[in-house]
Image (cartoon, rainbow, N blue to C red):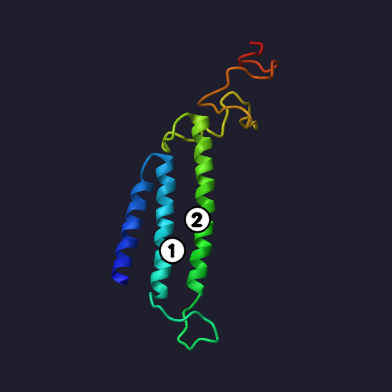
């Protein structure tokens, strides 16, 4: 049984690395999830795949160690929250840039090319890849709606 689990862990890690090397951001998130699942299976396999009694004092021993199951449960919750956060960031990056190619993101999502030194992009407006057509500040020169 351990051999089957080790093959499954290897396949999950291989699929996760393959997806991590992709240029699409959703595939990268799925690759991270697959590697997390492989880690959970590795913890379960290392703990042993026996069917001993639960650690209750009324049942005769040997007892099963509950720590690996607790670690896996915690890892599942953390992995779900991390995946949800990464998918939210991926959605926002797609909305700002208009594409989901990881290699094409670069640093231009965080910087506004029209902003002066020390000023960052406005989080309420679209990013420099897809700028707004109308800006609310009529005093700012060089911007649509402003004085030239």
Viewer-proximal residue, 89 or 69?
69
> How far across and down, in percent of the image, does residue 106 sit?
47, 35
Q: Nearer the viewer, residue 143 or 54?
A: 54
Give the answer, above or below, for where 2 lies relative to 117.
below
Seen at 39% across and 78% down, the residue is 50
- Please count the marks in the image: 2
Q: Is residue 2 above or below residue 81?
A: below
The residue that appears at 41% across and 37% down in the rendered structure is 103
| Badge 1 vs badge 2, beta-carbon distance below 8 Å | yes
Nearest to the observer: residue 24 or residue 48: 48
Q: Does residue 46 sit above or below 58 in this rendering?
A: above
User: Would you call the spot at circle 1 few (<14 residues within 10 Å), some (14-19), or many (20 or more)?
Assistant: many
Q: Quadrant of the N terminus?
A: bottom left
Q: Is residue 17 left or right of residue 139?
A: left
Q: Specify few, some or many for label 2: CA neighbours under 10 Å numbering under 14, 14-19, or 20 or more.
A: some
Residue 79 tag number = 2
Q: Which residue is mark 1?
A: 40
**In the depicted structure, whether residue 84 falls above or below residue 46:** above
Pick out the residue farthest to the front. Answer: 58
User: Can you give x and y, in whole percent of width and height, for residue 129 in the image?
Assistant: 50, 26
């Amino acid at each position: 049984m351990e051999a089957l689990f080790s093959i499954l862990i290897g396949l999950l890690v291989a699929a996760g690395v393959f997806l991590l090397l992709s240029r699409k951001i959703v595939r990268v998130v799925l690759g991270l999830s697959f590697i997390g699942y492989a880690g959970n299976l590795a913890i379960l396999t290392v703990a042993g795949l026996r069917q001993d009694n639960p650690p209750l004092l009324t049942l005769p021993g040997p007892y099963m160690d509950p720590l690996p199951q607790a670690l896996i449960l915690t890892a599942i919750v953390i992995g779900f929250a991390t995946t949800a956060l990464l998918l939210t960031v991926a959605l926002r990056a797609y909305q700002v840039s208009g594409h989901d190619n990881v290699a094409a993101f670069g640093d231009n999502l965080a910087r506004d090319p029209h902003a002066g030194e020390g000023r960052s992009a406005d989080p309420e407006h679209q990013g420099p890849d897809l700028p707004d057509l109308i800006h609310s500040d009529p005093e700012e020169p060089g911007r649509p709606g402003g004085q030239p």
